[in-house]
Amino acid sequence: MTQLTEIRFNEQHILLHHNLVKSGILPEKANELGRNITIQGDTVIEGAVYANKLDIQTGPFEVKGAVFTQLELYIASQATGDIAFKKSVASADAVVSRAAGCNLLFYSDINAKSVTLSNAFVAGSIYADEVVLENCVVIGGVFANNSTELSNCMIGTFSCQSVRIDQQLFLLLPSAFSTERISLIPGTKLFNLSLADLGALYAGTEPARNSGKIEMNAETDETTTTLTDDSMQKTIRSYSVAGKVLAADLLDTDKFQNHFLLSAASLSSQLLQNYHLKADDSARSVTLTFPKLKEFFFKILAGQIEISEIDGSFNIGDLTKNFIKS
């Protein structure tokens, strides 16, 4: 990034290019509530942002405080460079990015009426009425009141009214939920990574025995539960590998360090230091940094890091011995 110029302003429309804003951009008068902000690259905002519309034409761009827009947070399709939001992002209407050429990072949660993202890494969760994700990684969950469309994505979990899935979907947690039966485009694959040895894969060492991805079947892995009270009845569908995870837990999955890895990714903006993952029994350790974690999960999504399917066979005698020892 080039040398930035500090700026002060009180205009109704703010245009930022090669600027460093050492404070937030917040309205001080009623007539500033409708203020639009346009970003043309090489810009850092060190505080929080409130705008009627935040239009990001290209990166690099970084905002270190929380962001709220009354109308829309929009990233142009031709945007390039790093675009990073270090705190929560919210909109009364929409958060939209279809840019394929930028490195889009959300370090925390997104909350809006509708969220449409392509090629984005979200360390937190997404809360919206409608969600459309393409080639995205969400470490937390996708929680939509209405519809969700997922195309070639990796997410922690989902809880939605209706879900449409295309190409492939990786789940990081054992279970996900929907009200309506999920819709799969023919040829779509569902995988669960809760028993994959992500710690070893991140460190580049040999994964543990009896670890790997689990291919899910939307029909056989579905459990339907009906909740009723005096006034209403609601059906919840659960898509889960929890039973397999419970059996494998007796095989000491703590050494996978998956929870540690996911926590480091989701809490990165709040940590005061970098943490280290112990790769094996030797003294060697690997540093957990946000850029490396983002690159790691996208390599899994792209197939550059291959995870073998788990061997589902196990010996009951071995499980009993481990249970008695514990």
Image: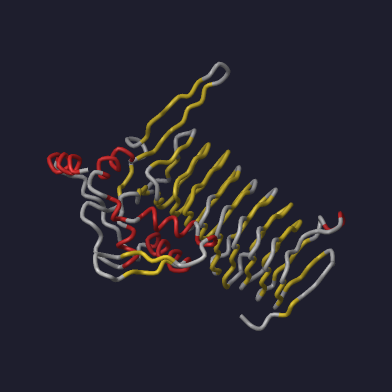
Q: Where is residue 1 drawn, in percent x and y?
A: 61, 80
Q: Residue drawn 45% across and 40% down?
A: 183
Q: Residue drawn 23% across and 57% down?
A: 208
Q: Nearer the viewer, residue 60 or 96?
A: 60
Q: Nearer the viewer, residue 46 or 179?
A: 46
Instruction: Give the farthest residue toward the front.
Output: 325
- Is 244 left or right of 79, judged from the image as shown? left
The quarter holding residue 197 reads bottom left
Q: Residue drawn 64% across and 48% down?
A: 112
Q: Nearer the viewer, residue 284 or 201?
A: 284
- Is 61 left or right of 132, judged from the image as shown? right
Q: Nearer the viewer, residue 39 or 84?
A: 84
How does the figure colour the protein chain or chains? secondary structure
Instruction: Give the farthest residue toward the left.
Output: 317
Q: Residue drawn 27% across and 53% down?
A: 212
- Is 212 left or right of 15, judged from the image as shown? left
Task: Report the quarter where the C terminus lies.
Answer: top left
Mark count: 0
Q: Where is residue 67 drawn, in percent x and y?
A: 67, 58
Position of 93 relative to 269 (above/below): above
Q: Where is residue 275 drawn, in percent x and y?
A: 42, 65
The quarter holding residue 43 reads bottom right
- Is 166 left or right of 44, judged from the image as shown? left
Q: Where is residue 249 drawn, in percent x and y?
A: 27, 44
Instruction: Give the farthest residue toward the bottom.
Output: 3
